[in-house]
Structures are given as structure tokens and as C-alpha cells.
Amino acid sequence: VHHNGLHELPLLLAATLRAPMITTLHTPPLPLWESTLAVTGPRSSFVAVSEHVRRSWSHCLSSVVVRNGLDLTRWRSGDGGGPAVWSGRLVPEKAPHEAIDACRAAGVPLVLAGPVHDREYVEREVTPRLGAGATYLGHLRHEELGDWLRRASVAVVTPAWDEPYGLVVSEALASGTPVAGYDRGALSEIVAPGSGVLVPSGDVSAVAGAVRAARSLDRQHVRRRAEAVCSASWMIEQYEHCYVGLVDPLVAA
């Protein structure tokens, strides 16, 4: 059984199953999970989507790292040359308003895409900043977002929290688009030198400089970074290895 949920009940019931269970950790530690594990102990095997997540859970469980992967045949590389792109949920912890400020300071037009999950925040911080080179495209389908990323000169990421993984970063790299943004959470595990420029969190001026610098990076190198660390086929191989490790002792018994 492969558990990808956020509810603590599967952790409680894992010991009642005839089949072994593996749980993927997609988030920072959850209080109800920590309480459950303190009472029951780990009844599942665990996988973390990044080294950052593995470390954040290490006080209460052990896990191995299997990064999320993309179907790289669907996320194709493009020629770039267009505006900067920011994508994701429009919420305070993603800080799209800081991406607007940074790109405006850098003199680079920006398009934003994603669902509005906090309307009050968007109306207060994002909407007043639109115009003058900043455009909100709405919530795009994957195909539409891929088109924009392939045309983009740079992808901007401005998390105000520690990203457990950073799927938008993988999508940008797979499109051949270099990344500029804050070094938070697991982002430095994905963005290596030559594929983007990460700067200290909260420094909008530094992001503006990163936007200018990242635009000149080699897009073929960026795509190769995605192939090295963001491939769904690699992710599947790693999970199959985990499954075999759980099943082989049962077969031997």
C-alpha cells in the first residue's frame, strides 16, 4: 500500500494490513502525525520528497529520499526570449507580489499564472501591482503553462516558507527555463549552478539581480539539469526499489 495522504488514520491502521505500507512525506511535520507516531511508533516505511523534508521529520521517523518526477516528454524545452514567468498558488507563503517588485526593478516583464487561494491577499498585495509590465494570466491548464514556460526567459520563485520540494521549479527546468528566486527549503537541491540563481530569502533587490543574471544561462544546460534530477522514470525506479525492499522479506518468509 502506497500512502500519499495527509490524514493520520492510515498511520494508525497500517499494522492491521496484510500488505506492507509505504508513506510519502510531502509536507513539513504535521502535529497530528507526530502525536500518532509518538503513541504507536512507525508502522509504515517512509519516503521524503527531498533531503530538506527528510531532515525535518528525522526527530520522529526515518525516511529515504525519492524526489518528485515529471514526465519529460510532456514538459519540453523551448527557445525562451520572452517575459519572466511566476507560477503557483497565489497565497502569502508564495509571495507573488515580491516577484512583481523584483521583475519591475530588473526591468523585465512578468506574467503570473495560478489559482487564487487567498483572495484577500491577492486583492491587497497582487492586484494593485499589476500593469506596467506585470500581467496575471489566471489559472492555466498544464499545456498552456508549458507554452509560457518554454517562451519565458526566466522563471521566478519567491517562497516565503521552506518549500518541501518545489514542483514549479522542476517544470521550469524541464522547459529549459532558468530559475531565479529565494533559496528556501529544498530549492537548492533542484537548482544547481548553471540552471538558476538563488539568493537569500526576503531580499527583493537580490532577486532582481538574480532575474537579470539567470536570463543569460544556457537553456540546454538547464534542460539537462531537469533530466538529471526531475525525471519521472528515475522516480519510478526508486519507488520500485523501495517496493521490492518491502516485499522480498515477505516472499522469503
Image (tube, grey):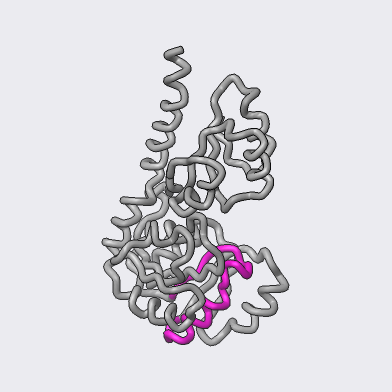
The image quarter containing residue 147 is bottom left
Tell me if residue 26 comes above or below residue 154 in the rendering.
above
Give the quadrant of the N terminus: top right
Which residue is located at x 53 percent, y 87 percent?
132
> Which residue, as the protein is rendered here, is positioned at the far top?
253
Tell me if residue 127 comes above or below residue 31 in the rendering.
below
Which residue is located at x 38 percent, y 36 percent?
237
Where residue 6 appears, x then y in whole percent?
Answer: 64, 44
Which residue is located at x 65 percent, y 23 percent?
16
Span shown in magenta = 84-108
Residues 112 and 246: in front is 246
Residue 210 lies in the magenta stretch = no
Residue 64 visible to the viewer: yes
Tell me if residue 19 comes above or below residue 114 in the rendering.
above
Which residue is located at x 64 percent, y 43 percent?
33
Where residue 3 appears, x then y in whole percent?
Answer: 58, 36
Residue 250 is left or right of residue 218, and the answer is right
Where residue 199 appears, x then y in whole percent?
Answer: 41, 73
